[in-house]
Amino acid sequence: MPNKILLFNPRSSNGKYRIPNSILQVGASIYGKYDFVCVDGNIEQDPWQIIKSYFDSGEFSYFCCTVMPGPQLRQAIPFTKKIKALFPNCITIWGGYFPSNQFKVCINASYVDYIVDGPGDATFPSLITTLENNNLSHLKQIKNLIYLDYKGDITKTPKEALLDQDSLPPLPYTHLDTFYNLDNYLSKTFLGTKTFSYHSSLGCPFTCSFCAVVPVYEGRWKAKSAKTVYKDVLYFKNRYNIDAVEFHDNNFFTSKKRVIEFSELIKNDGITWWGEGRIDTIDKYSDEDLILMKEAGCKMIFLGAETGNDEILKQMNKGGTQTGEGIKKFAKRLHPIGIIPEFSFVLGMPAETPEKVMAQIEWDINFIKEIKEINPDAEIIIY
């Protein structure tokens, strides 16, 4: 009988829970093929005791962890170390932005056996099957994989083409529901009383220098169709009575055609929504497009302004046609339409001296004040 798999989502926040789409995506790839459980560090008060109890049963041989840089490392590292210490025959697999971007330090750690480098829809089930069959010579044929070979050298297999998102199996929400009541994830937000978090696409076609997405997807973007997205949202409305959606895509608004089609589909369902996008991309939408989005429930858009300084935008390799003047014009344009712009700024980019860094920060703060004068409804986020 195949060994069981534990999928772990380390704690990344306190109090506000979102559906752990990353481990659900991996779970979908093995659903019905291998037995797996989900442990969510955001909900569990003591996730280690839950994890240990599973491995104490002797039925589990795979500890699989999604790892974002930042807070998730505070559980991912010590828990993986403990698993290796207590259950040395267990296979540990990491995925997510941190191990993909910092793969050398991760794979050279004594407690990480394999890294899924990017999407795991095909990589993860292939890896599990290869390990279950003890066919290690097949590892080099699995794309999106990082591991140490028998000499201790790092092997990084080629990137896989992004898969057709509509062809992938649906996320196993009902399976997650057996561990955690899904209503726990549908929390009250600015958007609504029961907010659903969802990913409708992968990657981003731009290559900003500071972005963790760039090395993983290399300027590639692939999306579910508007009809598939609407079908999933409608399922949650009918089954769980959601009234809002957060689209956590890296760039939800890349395809205007898809966004407009989705807006037409959802406009009579009473659902408000939010997504992330680029100012110079959405500024190409017509006023009629933006008004339709507003009428269809688009309440706020997260926009990477980064800075109002055109030279710093070039330093960031922001690409496209974004400028400081363009940011101000777009803030003004959205105001009468009623969609709230949520501008994020990255302060403290490197410069020749600390004084120049601080001068640029002061300049950007004054620029942010201008934005608030142009559009008092604009929300500002500082990184």
Image (cartoon, rainbow, N blue to C red):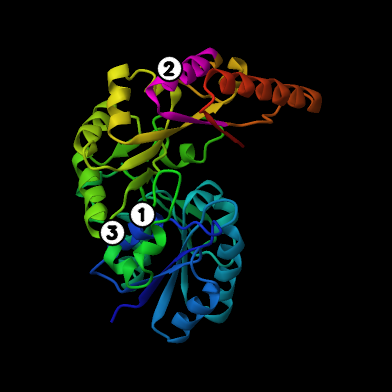
Magenta segment includes 246 = no
Q: Tag 3's secondary structure?
A: helix
Image x and y of residue 269, in percent? 23, 42
> Across the whole image, how many numbered discs are drawn on residues?
3
Q: Give the amino acid at mark 3.
A: Tyr
Q: Local crowd at mark 2 within 10 Å, few (<14), some, or many (≥20)?
A: some
Can residue 237 be seen here? The reply is yes
Specify the quadrant of the image occupied by residue 75.
bottom right
Which amino acid type corresponds to the residue marked 2 in the rendered image? Arg
Numbered circle sitting on residue 35 = none
| Residue beneath the point at 32% across and 17% down | 287
Around disc 1, counting alpha carbons within 10 Å, would you say few (fewer than 14), some (14 to 19), or many (20 or more)?
Answer: many
Residue 361 in the image: above or below residue 213: above
Find residue 213 and report its horizontal and vertical position in percent: 47, 40
What residue type is disc 1 on?
Answer: Gly
Q: What separation in Å lies between label 2 and label 3 (alpha carbons)?
A: 36 Å
Label 3 belongs to which residue? 240
Front: mark 2 or 1: 2
Identify the image quadrant of the N terminus. Answer: bottom left
Q: Which residue is mark 1?
A: 120
Q: Regarding mark 2 in the picture, which secondary structure is present there?
A: helix
Q: Residue at x 56, y 59 (%)?
A: 14
Which residue has dot 2 on it? Answer: 333
Part of the protein shown in magenta: 325-344
**Image location (x, y in percent) of residue 28:** 29, 60
> Could you tell me which quadrant the C terminus lies in?
top right
